[in-house]
Image (tube, helix red, strand yellow):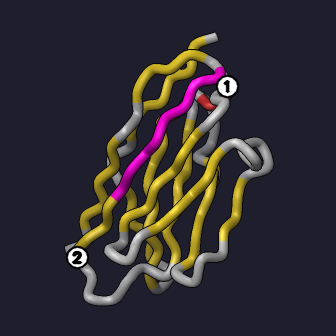
Amino acid sequence: QVRVVESGGGLVQAGGSLRLSCTASGRVNSFPVMGWYRQSPGKERELVAQMTRAGHTNYAESVEGRFTISRDVRDGVYLQMNNLKPDDTAVYYCNAKYASVNYWGQGTQVTVSS
């Protein structure tokens, strides 16, 4: 059974930094794609960043240059968030994809005060 667990959210002032961490377990083979999504009240869940096993990355335009995604060989994925803005306030979800199936964590709240 796949298990996805996030940590690292919190409250930070605008301009500050946070680092989110996630581990996915339960598969013999590594997940081909892992990433982060976010959802704020009244909005749809949106992609923030994702990374393939080969190291290819994809970022939302709104976070390009401020956020950095990374992975390790044990199916950990991390999101370093710098120069945070109030618009970054949302629940952040870790995502692991395998064979067209999406696995989600429970979400971690990030709140950026102005």
Position of residue 78 measured from the top left corner of the image (x, y, whole percent): 46, 55
Mark 1 or mark 2, which is nearer the start of the sequence?
2
Question: Up-down: is 94 above or below 103?
Answer: above
> What predominant SS class does the magenta segment belong to?
strand
Left or right: 20, with 49 as reference point? left
Which residue was labeled with disc 1?
Answer: 85
Q: Nearer the viewer, residue 93 or 21?
A: 21
- Give neighbour class at mark 2: few <14, some 14-19, many 20+ (Cα, 10 Å): few
34 relative position to 75: left or right: right
Name which quarter of the figure residue 51 lies in: bottom right
Residue 86 lies in the magenta stretch: no
SS for tag 1? Answer: loop
Screen quadrant of the N terminus: bottom left
> Looking at numbered disc 1 in the image, what kind of residue is underneath it?
Lys
Helix or strand or loop: what does disc 2 sit on? loop
Q: Which residues are magenta?
A: 15-22
Query: In the rendering, at what x and y percent does residue 48 appear?
Result: 63, 51
10 Å crowding of disc 1: few (<14), some (14-19), many (20+): many
Instruction: Kindly identify the residue that appears in the image at 59 percent across and 64 percent down.
Output: 50
- Which residue is at the far top? 114
Image position, residue 4 (x, y; %): 30, 60
Instruction: Give the amino acid at mark 2.
Output: Gly
Location of mark 2 (residue): 26
